[in-house]
Image (cartoon, rainbow, N blue to C red):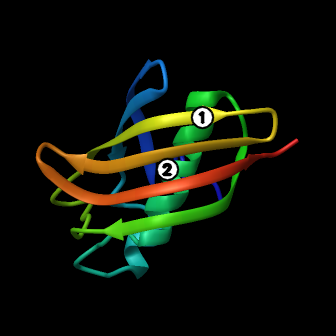
């Protein structure tokens, strides 16, 4: 499922060598938040990981599918009501013909919501 345009929109994207920062705006009216959880919406961890994959694909110009993930840590609750604007900071981006690897920190100001170290396969 593609979350761009439903769960979030891209506000700003900056790349610099093997790193990039993407600022997004979460949509608190998204159907996912109506189920998770009504009246107290929380961004599901799987949606944070999928968003990271989609944003990495946008950075590299590839359609990506997650093939391996390690060291995933969810450190704080990400509420679209309290934190509409969120930043995905990518580092160590490496790519070859078939895969893309990166580390990402999801946060806002000094608060970190998640860290992910993952590998994606480029879809043909």
Q: Camera-side residue: 74 or 39? A: 74
**The quadrant where residue 77 appears:** bottom left
Q: Residues within 10 Å of mark 1 (few under 14, many from 20)?
A: some
Residue 6, can we see it?
Answer: no
Q: Residue 52 carries which label?
A: 2
Cβ atoms under marks 1 and 2 closer than 8 Å: no
**Residue at screen point 55% across, 58% down:** 50
Q: Residue 94 carries which label?
A: 1
- Residue 73: percent from the left, percent from the top? 35, 68
How many discs appear? 2
- Residue 109: percent from the left, percent from the top? 13, 43
Per the image, label 2 sits on a secondary structure element best described as: helix
Instruction: Give the spatial CA distance, label 1 vs label 2.
Output: 15 Å
Vertical comparison of 117 with 91: above or below: below
Which residue is at the far left? 110
Left of 113 or right of it: where is 3? Answer: right
Quadrant where the C terminus is found in the figure? top right
Vertical comparison of 97 with 73: above or below: above
């Amino acid at each position: 499922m593609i979350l761009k345009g439903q769960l979030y929109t891209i506000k700003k994207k900056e790349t610099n060598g093997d790193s990039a920062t993407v600022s997004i705006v979460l949509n608190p009216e998204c159907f996912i938040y109506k189920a998770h959880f009504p009246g107290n919406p929380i961004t599901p961890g799987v949606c944070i990981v999928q968003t990271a994959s989609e944003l990495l694909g946008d950075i590299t110009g590839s359609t990506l599918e997650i093939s391996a993930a390690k060291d995933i840590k969810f450190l704080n609750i990400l509420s679209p009501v309290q934190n509409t604007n969120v930043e995905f900071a990518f580092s160590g981006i490496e790519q070859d013909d078939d895969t893309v690897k990166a580390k990402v920190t999801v946060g806002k100001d000094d608060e970190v919501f998640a860290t992910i170290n993952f590998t994606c396969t480029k879809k043909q």
